[in-house]
Amino acid sequence: MTAPRTTPRKVLGRLSLPERTFVADALRTETVGGVLLLIAAIAALTWANIPALHDGYETVSHYHLGPASLGLNMSVAHWAADGLLAVFFFVAGIELKRELVAGDLKDPRAAALPVVAALCGMAVPALVYTLVNVTGGGSLAGWAVPTATDIAFALAVLAVIGTSLPSALRAFLLTLAVVDDLFAILIIAVFFTDDLDFAALGGAAAALAVFWLLLRKGVRGWYVYVPLAVVVWALMYNSGVHATIAGVAMGLMLRCHRRDGEAHSPGERIEHRVRPLSAGLAVPLFALFSAGVPVSGRALGEVFGQPETLGVVLGLVVGKAVGIFGGTWLTARFTRASLNEDLAWADVFAVAALAGIGFTVSLLIGELAFEGDAAMTGEVKAAVLVGSLIAAALATVLLKIRNARYRRLWEAEERDEDDDGVPDVYEEDDPEYHLRMARLHERKAAEHRRIAEEKAAERRALAEVPGGAGDDHDGPA
């Protein structure tokens, strides 16, 4: 008795229709947010580097506000990093939960590729940074800076260069970023937590337990959860654990699987509402008050002259591309999966290069890694900007080379000849689809026959009229 044949697993194969719809919606919001992020970064650099405006930027960034009695009297820049980014990490927590219960990470075999690729895409940049600084005598404190990918900035680059990247590659990039965010959260929680206040931490845990209980009891209403979320965040901030961890924890508590009769899970509904706030307001404001670093020929030269900043640049440009591509290739090699026949390994490398754009989380980790050293913090931020710019330029060149191919693949994915709202590629195995197409083509054929008969009758009538177009003597005078 022969064993049943199994279909070989595909690397970067076609997405299921629900997953494709979700990815398209998520990426649409992230792309708009990425463009706003790009505008905010340019505004910050302009504001901080025009001599007449520089003092104003510093004044606004370091202006303190908030109740000191609650330990929340922070600068505007600090509020952006610890407060607004909690919203960003809340969305990241929901994304991660959805991927674990309903997305690609639900199936261990399917999850292996993005998880291994993301791990390698974080380990190799950290290794590159470490090697550069060990050989150059620099500080190892910034090893985590080049490990993060900024999905919004990467999608903004795609939007600007107009690349019709196939949905499988876009989904791969999004899933990479979700896993990347998870490990970035763990890095922040483990390596950048000092002097724990156990009373505040216990209060945060108790508030989170109340949050979880209310969710399980089905209590609804933003007026219940938003004040409670603020309490959780404030207690987490005062505990010594980075406040953004509160956002992740609450995001992971939301239910992201659908029950019978539900069009969307609570997690999906809340993510749909909060994501525009995160991508359109929280992250751009963080960029506005974090990306304002001095940029000059001398400053840019110093980026390549110091081991700490050179390590960040090489980690983002070389480490990310080599790590993600290597992890993807090794996973395919040892699981005996074949690459989607519509794509080539050059496409995977181009996306891996694009993942070298590290902005939001890289800037945050840079601030945490060199806290107390304002000069080095500014230089590391400049290195993040330079590395991200080089990675974006490299990815642009690589993607543009294949853009005609991508456009054909994208058009094939979007084609819907029977106008039923479902792309034709998802209906090729459905007999009803082919019957609909047959009826459609029959109607078109009948219409063309009718037009042909009318045109033939017009020609015959014209030929029978003396001096008409069919007359042998018709011609120029």
Image (spheres, rainbow, N blue to C red):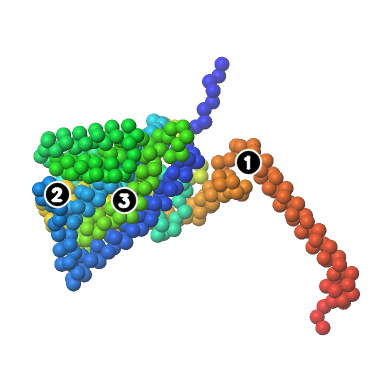
Residue that numbered label 2 is attached to:
72
Q: Position of residue 161 (x, y in %)?
A: 41, 59
Which amino acid lies under the numbered mark 1 shown in the image of this protein? Tyr
User: Can you say which quadrant of the picture contains the N terminus?
Assistant: top right
Tag 2: Cα neighbours inside 10 Å, few (<14), some, or many (≥20)?
A: some
Nearer the N terminus, badge 3 or badge 1?
A: 3
Q: Is residue 232 visible?
A: yes
- For disc 3, the neighbor class at 10 Å (few under 14, some 14 to 19, many from 20) is many
Q: Picture coordinates of residue 254 (x, y %)?
A: 33, 37
Precedes in sequence: disc 2 or disc 3: 2
Q: Say which amino acid is labelled 2.
A: Leu
Q: Position of residue 251 (x, y in %)?
A: 30, 40
Q: Amino acid at mark 3?
A: Ser
Q: What residue appears at the point 33 percent right and 58 percent down from the top-left corner?
A: 36
**Residue drawn 86% across and 67% down?**
461
User: In this view of the protein, which residue sits in the foreground, 152 or 72?
Assistant: 72
Please identify the quarter of the rendering in which residue 291 is found: bottom left
Question: Is there any visible trace of residue 347 in the rendered image?
Answer: no
Q: Residue at x 25, y 66 (%)?
A: 46
- Mark 2 vs mark 3: give the one in front: 2
**Left or right of residue 318: residue 299:** left
User: Which image quarter holds the C terminus?
Assistant: bottom right
Identify the element where label 1 is drawn: helix
What number is the disc on residue 125?
none
Q: How far apart in space, not on screen, are marks 1 and 2 (Cα)?
A: 60 Å
Question: Residue 145 at x, y = what percent?
Answer: 22, 48
Alpha-carbon span between mark 3 and mark 1: 40 Å
Q: Quadrant of residue 126?
A: top left
Residue at point 12% right, 46% down? 70
The tag on residue 278 is: 3
User: Which residue lies under the disc numbered 1?
Assistant: 433
Secondary structure under badge 3? helix
